[in-house]
Image (cartoon, rainbow, N blue to C red):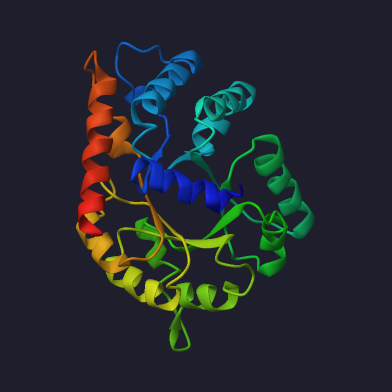
C-alpha cells in the first residue's frame, strides 16, 4: 500500500478527513505533565490514543522537536512509532534545497523516519523538489498559499497578470501525478482556496489554519467543494483540555466535534 492508498483507507475507516497537528509546546501542556521530553512524549501518547480513530492523518511540525537537539529527535522518532500503522503521517518540515541536499532530506524523512508525506517549498524550482517525488510511493505537499499573514508578502503578489501562488501551481502541476503531488493551501484564504481548487480540482490539498489561526470549517469546505483534502487543526484540538486532569477526554471531544463538523459540511 502506497501513501495515498493508506490515506484513502484511513479516511474511509475513520470517516474522516481530519488531521491533528502534533505541534507540542511544553509550556502549554496540562500542569500535571512534566515540562520535559518525557512529559511531551506522554502528552503525544494521550493525544494519539484519544484521537486515532477520528483522524485520517497526523501532521508533525519538525521544528517543535528539532529545537531540543538529540533528545528532540528521539522524541520525534518515539512519537512516530506510537502512531498506528494505518494512519497517514505528514512530516511538516518545509524542506527544499539544491538536488543533492533535497535527496538527503528525502532519505531522512521517507527512509529513516518512515513518514508518508512531506511539506516542501517550491521556490528553488523543480530540481529541488524532484528528489522527494522520486519516492513514487510517497506524497509531497508543495507550499502554494500558506495560512500565515506573511503569505501576503510574496504568495499573493502579482507576477504579470497572475499571483505568485498561481504561477507555482501552473509550473509544478506536471512535476508529479495526482497520487504523489498535492498542495498546501491555508484555511485563512477561502476565496483563493476556491480559485486554487478550480485550477487543481483533482489534487490533494493539505489545509492548515482551522481554529486558532481563524479558518472557518464551513467556509473551507464550501470553497473546497468535493476536492480531496486533509484538514488540519493543531492548537484548537491538542490544548482543548487546558489544565483538566482528564485532558485527553477534552482533546477527543474537540477532535470528534471538528471531524463531525467537516463531515456535515461536505455532504
Total labels drawn: 0
**Looking at the rendering, which quadrant does residue 194 occupy?**
bottom left
Q: Is residue 53 left or right of residue 94?
A: left
Residue 115 image offset from top left, x and y in percent? 60, 41
State the residue lying farthest toward the bottom: 161
57 or 16, which is in the foreground? 16
Q: Is residue 213 above or below residue 240?
A: below
- For image coordinates 43% across by 15% down, the residue present is 39
239 or 28, which is in the foreground? 239
Can residue 216 be seen in this snapshot?
A: no
Residue 34 image offset from top left, x and y in percent? 40, 11
- For image coordinates 32% across by 58% down, the residue present is 187
14 or 119, which is in the foreground? 14
Can residue 155 be seen in this snapshot?
A: yes
**Looking at the rendering, which quadrant does residue 58 occupy?**
top left
Residue 57 image offset from top left, x and y in percent? 44, 42
Locate the C terminus by quadrant. Answer: bottom left
Residue 237 image offset from top left, x and y in percent? 29, 35
Amino acid at each position: 500500500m502506497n501513501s495515498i492508498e493508506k490515506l484513502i483507507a484511513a479516511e474511509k475507516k475513520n470517516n474522516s478527513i481530519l488531521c491533528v497537528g502534533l505541534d507540542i509546546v511544553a509550556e502549554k501542556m496540562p500542569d500535571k505533565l512534566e515540562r520535559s521530553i518525557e512529559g511531551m512524549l506522554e502528552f503525544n501518547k494521550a493525544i494519539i490514543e484519544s484521537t486515532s480513530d477520528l483522524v485520517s492523518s497526523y501532521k508533525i511540525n519538525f521544528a517543535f522537536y528539532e529545537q531540543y537537539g538529540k533528545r528532540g529527535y528521539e522524541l520525534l522518532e518515539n512519537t512516530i512509532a506510537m502512531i498506528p500503522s494505518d494512519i497517514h503521517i505528514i512530516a511538516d518540515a518545509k524542506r527544499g534545497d539544491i538536488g543533492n541536499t533535497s535527496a538527503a532530506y528525502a532519505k531522512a524523512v521517507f527512509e529513516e523516519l518512515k513518514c508518508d508525506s512531506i511539506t516542501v517549498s517550491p521556490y528553488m524550482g523543480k530540481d529541488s523538489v524532484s528528489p522527494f517525488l522520486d519516492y513514487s510511493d510517497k506524497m509531497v505537499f508543495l507550499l502554494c498559499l500558506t495560512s500565515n499573514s506573511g503569505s501576503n508578502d510574496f504568495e499573493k503578489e502579482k507576477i504579470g497578470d497572475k499571483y505568485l501562488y498561481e504561477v507555482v501551481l501552473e509550473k509544478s502541476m506536471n512535476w508529479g501525478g495526482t497520487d504523489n503531488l498535492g498542495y498546501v493551501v491555508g484555511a485563512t484564504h477561502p476565496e483563493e482556496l476556491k480559485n486554487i481548487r478550480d485550477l487543481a480540482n483533482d489534487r490533494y490539498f493539505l489545509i492548515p489554519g482551522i481554529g486558532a489561526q481563524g479558518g472557518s470549517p464551513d467556509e473551507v469546505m464550501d470553497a473546497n467543494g468535493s476536492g480531496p483534502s486533509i484538514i488540519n487543526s493543531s492548537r484548537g484540538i491538542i490544548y482543548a483540555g487546558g489544565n483538566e486532569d482528564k485532558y485527553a477526554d477534552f482533546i477527543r471531544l474537540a477532535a470528534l466535534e471538528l471531524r463531525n463538523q467537516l463531515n456535515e459540511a461536505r455532504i
